Image (spheres, rainbow, N blue to C red):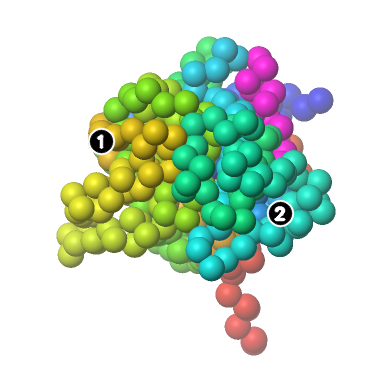
């Protein structure tokens, strides 16, 4: 149980993506007095242009794996409580290796840690998960992870923001904000129009903008956020339900009945212009659509609906950055790749830390201070 003082804490959350919104609603559930401030509209950042594959496939630190598995657990609870079948699905994930490589070791590793995985020969795929062209599958076969899924984050952000407002939370949109500090601690936010929001704690959850915003305060967070894009297609009749992670394209369904597509090679073809704008050539998009078609049964022609382009938040060492920023008491941050998978669990744990002042052991290896420079010897 929280004391009266704890539950009356005032918190300002900067950034209306999945991490900011889920933290804001979790804080409101804990009784905090919360203002969520975002520039443009909610979900206008990475959360609005994410592949949002819910997974903990392949190999990573055991702490990161544990957190991702908890992340998937929270999505399952959400799915059981909220009518979300159109925008949150657990139809599994299918992946196969590039030519000249094998996923046999990855499969053995996943089985070894109890991550649900089946090995499928190309001719077995259709009977387990529909809609894949068996000719596109690697000759050695593919890994099917039945527990994986995908989510349309803007739909979730809409649901969470409704609950947030119903619980008394305030949302300020079209408001770029900066952290306000005084006396060596974070004391709220200053909006671009000069308005100030006073708070006992500030959560900076501005996606790929986190490292630059902290750098402006002299705080270093390792950053390798690349320019990225997802191509969203128009609705198309096709049987695919699983998320596909294939050598040339990743594919998932969308709420509207189209597909979301991305890949590493198409990301690398993005041109970052001198003015900072991102340029994606028609030929890159056409090839990505063709790669998508190639892995789908019947090779349907895919028509572009729109592109979602911008930076993909990835911390310098690939692992999430969550929790208190020790250089500025009162300031917390959330900066993560896999922010879709972690979207609900991270908000829940951060809210608990902000309200209770108790660090969660689940976030112990993800602290911002791992990037702090070694103290200069006296
Ligand atoms: C192409 C792509 C593919 C991905 N695939 C996956 C995947 O398969 N699985 C997975 O788990 N994750 C995936 N991710 C990652 C995941 O989408 C992100 O980690 C997650 O959406 C980040 O959410 P966020 O809330 O941190 O940031 P964002 O969604 O970027 O939200 C931050 C918000 O802050 C706002 N903002 C910025 N500066 C300010 C300011 N000064 N004042 C006020 N507001 C500000 C922005 O406008 C934005 O709306 C992918 C991301 C991309 C881009």
Task: State whether residue 264 appears in this view.
Answer: yes
Where's residue 97, x and y in %? 56, 58
Secondary structure that dominates the magenta span = helix
> Crowding near pointer 2: few (<14 within 10 Å), some, many (20+)?
many
Tell me the residue that label 1 is attached to: 304
Considering the numbered disc 2 on the image, is that residue within a helix, a strand or a loop? helix
Where's residue 359, x and y in %? 74, 47
Q: Which portion, as a residue range, is magenta?
A: 68-81
Q: Is residue 65 left or right of residue 19?
A: right
The answer to which image quadrant residue 197 occupies is: top left
The answer to which image quadrant residue 341 occupies is: top right
Relative to 245, is 37 above or below? above
C-alpha separation, residue under disc 2 versus residue under disc 1: 34 Å
Relative to 11, is 359 above or below? below
The answer to which image quadrant residue 148 occupies is: top right
Task: State whether residue 345 appears in this view.
Answer: no
Residue positioned 30% across, 35% down in the render: 302
Residue positioned 53% across, 12% down in the render: 166
Tell me the residue that label 2 is attached to: 107
Front residue (pair 283, 124): 124
Front residue (pair 234, 369): 234
Which of the two labelled residues, at mark 2 and mark 1, occupies the earlier sequence position? 2
Query: Magenta segment: does it hold 72?
Result: yes
Query: Magenta segment: does it hold 222?
Result: no
Front residue (pair 140, 97): 140
Q: Is residue 169 left or right of residue 323?
A: left
Q: Quadrant of the C terminus?
A: bottom right
Front residue (pair 378, 170): 170
């Amino acid at each position: 149980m929280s004391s009266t003082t704890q539950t009356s804490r005032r918190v300002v959350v900067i950034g209306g993506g999945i991490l900011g919104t889920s933290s804001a609603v979790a804080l409101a559930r804990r009784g905090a007095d919360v203002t969520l401030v975002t520039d443009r509209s909610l979900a206008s950042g990475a959360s609005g242009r994410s592949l949002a594959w819910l997974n903990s496939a392949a190999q990573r630190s055991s702490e990161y794996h544990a957190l991702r598995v908890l992340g998937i657990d929270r999505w399952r609870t959400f799915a059981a409580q909220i009518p979300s079948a159109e925008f949150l699905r657990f139809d599994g994930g299918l992946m196969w290796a590039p030519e000249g490589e094998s996923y046999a070791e990855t499969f053995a590793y996943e089985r070894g840690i109890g991550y649900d995985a089946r090995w499928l020969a190309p001719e077995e795929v259709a009977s387990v998960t529909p809609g894949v062209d068996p000719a596109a599958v690697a000759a050695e076969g593919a890994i099917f992870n039945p527990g994986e899924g995908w989510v349309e984050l803007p739909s979730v952000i809409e649901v969470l923001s409704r609950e947030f407002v119903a619980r008394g939370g305030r949302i300020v949109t079209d408001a770029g904000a900066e952290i306000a500090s005084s006396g060596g601690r974070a004391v709220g936010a200053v909006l671009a129009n000069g308005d100030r929001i006073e708070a006992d704690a500030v959560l900076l959850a501005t996606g790929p903008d986190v490292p630059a915003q902290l750098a402006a305060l002299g705080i270093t967070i390792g950053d390798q956020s690349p320019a990225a894009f997802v191509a969203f297609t128009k609705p198309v009749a096709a049987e695919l339900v699983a998320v596909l992670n294939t050598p040339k394209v990743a594919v998932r369904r969308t709420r509207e009945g189209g597909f979301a597509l991305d890949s590493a090679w198409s990301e690398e073809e993005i041109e970052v212009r001198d003015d900072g704008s991102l340029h994606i050539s028609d030929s890159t998009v056409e090839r990505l659509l063709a790669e998508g078609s190639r892995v789908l049964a019947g090779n349907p022609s895919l028509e572009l609906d729109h592109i979602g382009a911008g930076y993909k938040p990835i911390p310098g060492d690939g692992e999430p950055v969550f929790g208190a920023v020790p250089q500025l008491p009162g300031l917390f941050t959330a900066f993560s790749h896999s922010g879709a998978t972690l979207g609900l669990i991270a908000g829940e744990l951060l809210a608990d830390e902000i309200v209770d002042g108790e660090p969660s052991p689940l976030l112990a290896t993800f602290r911002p201070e791992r990037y702090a420079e070694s103290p200069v010897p006296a």
